[in-house]
Amino acid sequence: MSTTGTDVSGALRSLPPVGLEELNSEAALQTRVDRKYVVPAGLARHLLGTLQADVRVLEMGGSRSFAYDSVYFDTPNLDSYMLAARGRRRRYKIRTRTYVDSAVSFLEVKTEGARDATVKERIPYHLQDRARLTPEGLDYVRETLTASVGAMPSGRLGPVLETRYNRTTLYLPESGSRATIDTGVTWQRPAHSAWVLEDAVILETKSGSTAGPLDRHLWAHGIRPSRISKFATGMAALCPDLPANRWNRTLTRDLSLRPTA
């Protein structure tokens, strides 16, 4: 396989596989601490190739990289975004997540729990409804947000941002953690042009409160977590008039976007 552009497959080719069932049973981590890193593609290949740990790669049907599509929903006043921009507790995100290769969609509600732990809840969703909230979907969002953060946003929820990328998932048995590597990350607002992250990957570790071996390997090479959210940072990058103090360093130091062809 080629290792040009943002492709990191060459560094992972020799690693043993793990199946989805085993991954989900051993490292489901629906409640977890996420650490995110924006890493230049060449450096990511080097660091993944030199990681001294037991690492397995999710493999399904002979493939190790899978296309993802997410549509995020917010109110006309961007209540969800503003809660994140102001660092409020009890913030949330509402999205559909589509696994493109298997044509399966979910409606997800993500909330921030104690000590920055992310709690994700989701239900199956019809693929044809991925870019809208059905009455049943709205009922689920209302019930979930009322139970987790105590309120439902007052404004009408509609799609505000779509993200697309290819994801490779790693399982690290030593710590029971997982990590994801997203390449070709693309952001697009409704009725606007799409923008792609240039020559970099978004690497995310998902573990309990203790950092895993991949985190420690990154830290040893001077790579520190970035304050990045595909939703909030993407909105800030595409809408410069929005308040974005929380992501200024990421936007100016780590993210280089270019229009898609």
Image (cartoon, grey):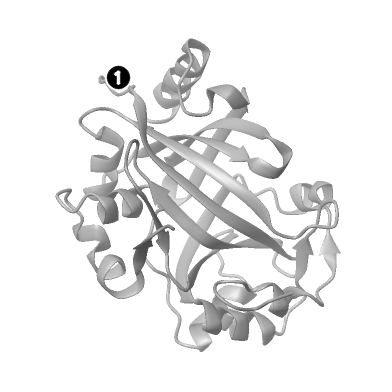
Determine whether, in the image, residue 100 is placed left or right of residue 226.
right
Find numbered disc 1 in the image and state the secondary structure of the residue it sits on: loop
The N terminus sits in image quarter: bottom right
Amino acid at circle 1: Arg
Determine whether, in the image, residue 44 is placed left or right of residue 178.
left
Residue depicted at x 38% and y 60% = 228
User: Residue 203, percent across and down?
Assistant: 53, 66
In the image, residue 169 above or below residue 38: above
Residue furthest top as drawn:
135
Dot 1 crowding, Cα within 10 Å, few <14, some 14–19, many 20+:
few
User: Residue 103, percent across and down?
Assistant: 69, 35
Looking at the picture, tell me which residue is in the foreground, 4 or 125: 4
- On the question of residue 173 being in view, the answer is no
Residue depicted at x 56% and y 61% = 182
In the image, residue 108 above or below residue 184: above
In the picture, residue 121 is in which quadrant? top right
Find disc 1 in the rendering and name its residue: 156
In the picture, residue 10 is in which quadrant? bottom right
Determine whether, in the image, residue 123 is placed left or right of residue 188.
right
User: Residue 256, percent across and down?
Assistant: 34, 69
Looking at the picture, tell me which residue is in the foreground, 170 or 252: 252
- On the question of residue 215 being in view, the answer is yes
User: Residue 60, percent across and down?
Assistant: 82, 52
In the picture, residue 48 is in which quadrant? bottom right
Determine whether, in the image, residue 13 is placed left or right of residue 143.
right
